[in-house]
Image (cartoon, rainbow, N blue to C red):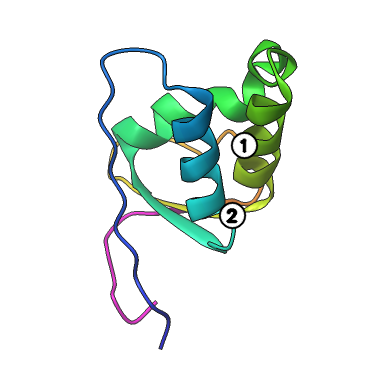
Amino acid sequence: MARLIYVTNVSWSTPSDEVFTFITDLVRPVGTYLYGRRLYETMVVWETDPALAAQSELRADFANVWRTADKIVDSTTLQAGSTTNTRLERRFDPET
């Protein structure tokens, strides 16, 4: 059985390079991200907006880590995933 790691970060300002590096290194080994619709729609910009990755090497690294990971979106309202390596699930099934 896979291990589930729950990560949440809250920021009211642009994270420092140290914080950004920490988060990227924390999620780098994660093979699959599990999202709800709203957070997935927020994170999609890391694949759809190349200007973010162009801002710095740190952001380019994070964008690459995010793009290459598998993403599972649990949603009854999202019509389709709009990024690579994305699977839509209509209901959460812990066995899956």
Q: Which residue is the extreme one toward the bottom?
A: 1
| Front in this rendered view, residue 80 or 59 | 59
On residue 44, the disc is: none
94 falls in the magenta region: yes
Q: Residues within 10 Å of mark 1 (few under 14, many from 20)?
A: many
Q: CA distance from mark 2 to mark 1?
A: 8 Å
The answer to whether one can see residue 35 in this image is yes
Q: Looking at numbered disc 1 in the image, what kind of residue is underneath it?
A: Phe
Q: Which residue is the extreme one toward the front?
A: 18
3 versus 30 height, above or below: below
Decide if residue 48 is on the left or right side of residue 72. Answer: right
Residue at the spot 60% in from the left edge and 43% down from the top edge: 66
Residue at the spot 40% in from the left edge and 88% down from the top edge: 1
On residue 28, the disc is: 2
| Front in this rendered view, residue 67 or 62 | 62
Q: Magenta region: which residues?
A: 87-96
Q: Quadrant of residue 9?
A: top left
Which quarter of the rendering shows the C terminus?
bottom left
Q: Which residue is mark 1?
A: 62
Q: Quadrant of residue 82?
A: top right
